Image (cartoon, rainbow, N blue to C red):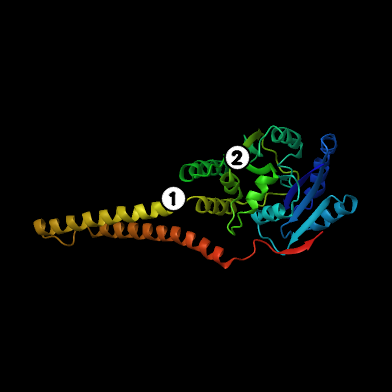
Amino acid sequence: MKLLSAIVPCYNEEENVPYFYEEFMKNEDFFKKHELEFELWYIDDGSRDKTAEEVKKLILKDKRVHLLSFSRNFGKEAALYAGLEKASGDYVACMDADLQDPPSLLPEMFGYLWQGYDTVATRRVTRRGEPLIRSFFARMFYKLMNKISETEIVDGARDFRLMTRQVVDALLSMKEYNRFTKGIFGWVGYRTKWIEFENVERKKGETKWSFWKLFMYSLEGITSFSTAPLAFAAFMGVLFCLFSFGLIIFTIVRKALFGDPTSGWPSLVCIISLVSGVQLFCLGIVGEYLAKTYMEVKNRPIYLVKEEI
């Protein structure tokens, strides 16, 4: 029999843990029919509520459920990586505990996998229930990423996907500390089938992704899979050097012809302020890449385990 490992990252999801298990178990007849065993890994990402306790209740009645608890909150990227490390299945699925990734799609996903695809991934075709400004910036992010990066990132892509063992091993070979999983999925390649579905609202609780966290996550993606910002910084440096040389020549010629060294100082102040702002912006871009290098060379673990059952 083949084994399916399902990875479920959790952060303060005590209300959703039992509901997810119930929805997942609705596929049990499908698993039996196709001779599939499964293991369910709940990755507790340093939750401050009773998420771990709820998972332990499930473990008492079903030994196929497992728990891995972090010593603190390391983020969803670390939770996904930890789950991939623990998963021993021939097939591995990543899904959210809030039921925005419907377990009911698993039979369809397996159908495509058995047709020869290496990965079956999901994407939302609508963003119903999201604030309009958040949806707008999300779409702009995907458009920007696909223009400046060679790695394709599909608009509306979810972390919900079903993979073969070969794909999982490829993902585990990428041990970088600064992780942007959507980009890593695209970078490893393999034959991928995309399934579209309508956006599903959370079963319980509130999203942990504020606008600021999503903004910082987008910066993580841009700097992880594109060096275009560095090229932009270099281009702006050359552009303003040429502009400065032209301005110097203009000033010398005007002095020689009109002998007026003082006129135009307000515009000069504006130009100096603009150039200084661009310099600081470009320095910030370089600093962002330098910070990533600094974190990588520290070689810190991606996560620390507090408890494993």
Locate residue 284 relative to residue 167 in the image: left or right: left
Percent coordinates x, y for residue 258 in the rendering: 10, 57
Classify the position of the N terminus by image quarter: top right
Percent coordinates x, y for residue 282 in the rendering: 40, 58
The circle drawn on residue 302 is none
Percent coordinates x, y for residue 18 in the rendering: 82, 48
Q: Residue furthest right?
A: 61
Locate residue 160 relative to residue 280 in the image: left or right: right
> Which is more toward the observer, 117 or 109?
117
Residue at x 35%, y 52% (from the top left corner): 235
Residue type (three-letter) at the residue carrying disc 2: Gly
Mark 2–mark 1 distance (CA, rounded to whole Å): 23 Å
Residue type (three-letter) at the residue carrying disc 1: Ala
Percent coordinates x, y for residue 76 in the rendering: 66, 54
Callout 1: helix, strand or loop? helix
Residue at x 53%, y 53% (from the top left corner): 224
Q: Is residue 33 visible?
A: yes
- Mark 2 lies on residue: 156
Locate residue 61 relative to residue 5 in the image: left or right: right
Q: Nearer the viewer, mark 2 or mark 1?
A: 1
- Mark 1 lies on residue: 228
Classify the position of the C terminus by image quarter: bottom right
Q: Please tell me whether residue 143 is drawn above or below residue 283 in the rendered image.
A: above
Q: Is residue 51 visible?
A: no
Callout 2: helix, strand or loop? loop
